[in-house]
Amino acid sequence: MSNDPNKPQSWIRWAMKPPQAYAVYLVAVLLVFGLSFLAGTLKPKQTPAPAPVTTPSVPRS
């Protein structure tokens, strides 16, 4: 039972070994780059602009 490959600790231990760690790091960097690129290409929601508030002008002398 202690050598169960489905345990989370075994995956973390596997991912921290040098060859796999480089791959995990690269995948994480590419995932962050891809998500930030996707977020940058999205168009913001078009909300109707509020009507400009007109203030009465003060007479100047």
Image (cartoon, rainbow, N blue to C red):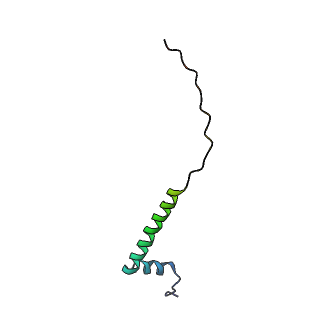
Q: Is residue 26 above or below residue 50?
A: below
Q: Is residue 21 left or right of residue 7?
A: left
- Which residue is painted at 59% across and 32% down in the image? 52
Image quadrant where residue 47 sits: top right
User: Count the marks: how many?
Assistant: 0
In this view, the residue in front, 29 or 60, is 60
Q: Position of residue 24 (x, y in %)?
A: 43, 74
- Which residue is painted at 63% across and 42% down in the image? 48
Q: Position of residue 53 (x, y in %)?
A: 59, 30
Q: Position of residue 32 (x, y in %)?
A: 46, 64
Specify the farthest residue to the left: 18
In this view, the residue in front, 28 or 13, is 28
Image quadrant where residue 50 sits: top right
- Which residue is painted at 47% across and 81% down in the image? 10
